[in-house]
C-alpha cells in the first residue's frame, strides 16, 4: 500500500472515529440497555450497527448522485461539511453533545419505563442518530464524492467499516468499559476528540473555499 493510500485510510479512520465517538456513546448504550439481559444488550448492539451501516453506506454510494441532482459542487459540499463538523466539534468540547445524548436516553427510558419488556432501541436512538448521525452521513458522502479511483473509494469504505466494527465491540463490552473509564475519563476523551475534529473541519472549510474561488 502506498503512502498516499495509508494517509487516506488514516485520515478517514480518525475522522469517523471522532464523529461516531463510540467511547462517548458507550455510557448511553449502557444506560439504555440496563434493564435488559445479556442477550438483549447483544441483540441491540448488533442491530444498531447493522442499521447504521446501511444508512452510512447508503449515503456514501448515493451521495454523488444526490449532489449532482441538486446541482451542488463538491467544493460547496466540502465547505458546508466543514462548518457542520465544526459545530459538532464545539458541542463535543463543551460536552453539549454528551448532554443531549443523555437527555435523549432519559426521555426514552421515561417513555417506556412501564413496559414489561425492554424496547427495541436499535434503530432510534442508537442506530440513528447516535451512530449514523448527520456528521458521519455527510462526511461519508463527501469522502466518496471526492474520490474517483475505486481503490481510494475502497480504502474509505474499509476505514468506515473498521470504525463500525470497533463501535460494535465497544457496545458489546460497554458495561465493564464504562465502569473502568469513569465519567471524568470519558468526558476528557470526548473533549480531546472534539479539538481534533475542529482542526479537521477548519481544514475542510479552507479547502472548500480555495476550490470554489480557485485560490
Image (cartoon, rainbow, N blue to C red):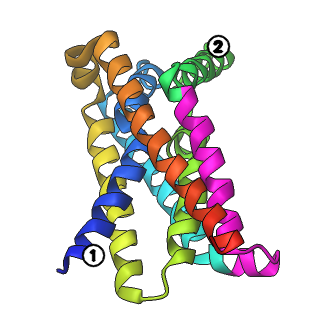
**Residue at position x 53%, y 76% from top?**
146
**Residue at position x 39%, y 70% from top?**
156
Tell me residue 201's x, y (percent). Answer: 53, 48
Relative to 134, is 140 above or below?
below
Name the disc covering residue 5, or none: 1
Secondary structure state at the residue bearing disc 1: helix
**Residue at position x 58%, y 48% from top?**
135
Tell me residue 77's x, y (percent). Answer: 68, 64
Residue numbers of the magenta segment: 65-91
User: 11 or 153, which is in the foreground?
Assistant: 11
Q: Quadrant of the N terminus?
A: bottom left
Mark 1 is surrounded, within 10 Å at the Cα level, by few (under 14), some (14 to 19) or many (20 or more) other residues, namely: some
Q: Are marks 2 and 1 in contact (CB under 8 Å)?
A: no
Position of 20 with respect to 123 (left or right) is left
Residue 72 figure quarter: bottom right
Residue 90 lies within the magenta run:
yes
Amino acid at each position: 500500500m502506498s503512502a498516499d493510500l495509508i494517509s487516506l485510510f488514516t485520515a478517514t479512520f480518525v475522522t469517523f472515529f471522532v464523529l461516531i465517538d463510540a467511547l462517548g456513546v458507550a455510557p448511553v448504550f449502557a444506560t439504555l440497555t440496563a434493564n435488559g439481559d445479556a442477550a438483549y444488550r447483544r441483540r441491540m448492539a448488533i442491530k444498531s450497527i447493522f442499521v447504521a451501516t446501511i444508512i452510512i453506506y447508503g449515503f456514501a454510494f448515493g451521495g454523488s448522485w444526490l449532489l449532482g441532482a441538486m446541482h451542488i459542487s463538491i467544493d460547496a459540499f466540502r465547505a458546508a461539511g466543514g462548518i457542520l463538523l465544526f459545530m459538532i466539534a464545539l458541542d463535543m468540547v463543551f460536552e453539549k453533545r454528551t448532554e443531549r445524548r443523555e437527555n435523549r436516553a432519559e426521555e426514552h427510558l421515561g417513555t417506556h419505563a412501564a413496559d414489561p419488556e425492554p424496547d427495541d432501541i436499535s434503530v432510534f436512538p442508537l442506530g440513528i442518530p447516535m451512530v449514523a448521525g448527520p456528521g458521519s452521513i455527510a462526511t461519508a458522502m463527501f469522502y466518496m464524492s471526492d474520490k474517483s479511483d475505486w481503490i481510494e473509494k475502497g480504502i474509505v469504505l474499509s476505514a468506515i467499516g473498521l470504525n463500525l466494527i470497533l463501535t460494535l465491540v465497544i457496545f458489546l463490552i460497554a458495561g465493564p468499559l464504562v465502569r473502568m473509564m469513569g465519567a471524568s475519563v470519558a468526558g476528557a476523551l470526548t473533549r480531546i476528540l472534539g479539538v481534533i475534529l475542529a482542526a479537521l473541519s477548519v481544514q475542510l472549510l479552507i479547502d472548500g473555499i480555495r476550490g470554489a474561488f480557485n485560490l
